[in-house]
Amino acid sequence: MPQEAQYALLELFRDGGIMMYFLVLASLLALGVIIAKGYMLFVAHRDSQELLGQLDTLRETGAGIDRAIEVADGTQGPVAAILSTGLRRMREKQSGRDIERAVSTIGAIELGFLEQGLVVLATVANVAPMMGFLGTVAGMISAFGAVAEAGQIEASLVAAGIKVALITTAAGLTIAIPVNIAYNFFVTRIDMLIMDMERGAQAMLDLGARVER
């Protein structure tokens, strides 16, 4: 980054006032969650697709439940957890109700794990603009306080306060917009994983029914 641009950013940060520190902290928190959640969902989706493909191959080759359990145990992700749980109970000849209850419980646990961190992104996306608006109010109060103290209206008196107001508002929106986009993207990816979990459960039932025959 050119030195002039770095200086301009530092100047904007200083002129934004104390609220800029809170906005920077919020942005760093959101960035950390976005990186961690993005990597986790990418790996989960990739592994789930590979596992579903392997299950299709196992069904075509006539492999048994033991081989399917071995493949599921060697894979990470929500689909693998559901398959491993359901297939083990099928191997133990448990009732359909018990299998369904176990799969539902594991699915709920995995879904909760997938949704971890989303509340942080939603909070930052909602709070960042509010912090920006709070900085706006503080800047306007400062501007009108300077006018009241001077007893007359001059552009130089109100310019500093208005500048703070505009900087904090822009910073809050700059943080909230990409965070909100990331939140919606992750929700979409989680919905896709839920569909993969349903496909995995159906594949498990198909494999179990074929073995019983």
Image: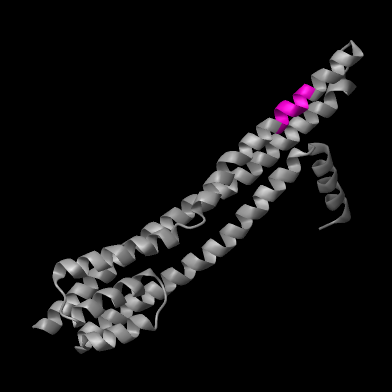
Q: Residue furthest top?
A: 151
Residue 64: x and y, percent? 21, 88
The vertical placement of 137 against 100, above or below, is above
Residue 181 visible: no
Residue 80: x and y, percent? 35, 75
For residue 67, what is the image quadrant? Answer: bottom left
Residues in magenta? 135-141
Report whether 169 appears left or right of 126: right
The vertical placement of 181 against 48, above or below, is above
- Closer to us: 162 or 209: 209
Residue 140 in magenta? Answer: yes
Report whether 178 appears left or right of 46: right
- Closer to us: 108 or 10: 108
For residue 143, what is the image quadrant? Answer: top right
Residue 171 in magenta? Answer: no
For residue 153, what is the image quadrant? Answer: top right
Q: Residue at x 14, y 72 (%)?
A: 95
Residue 203 visible: yes
Residue 191: x and y, percent? 37, 57
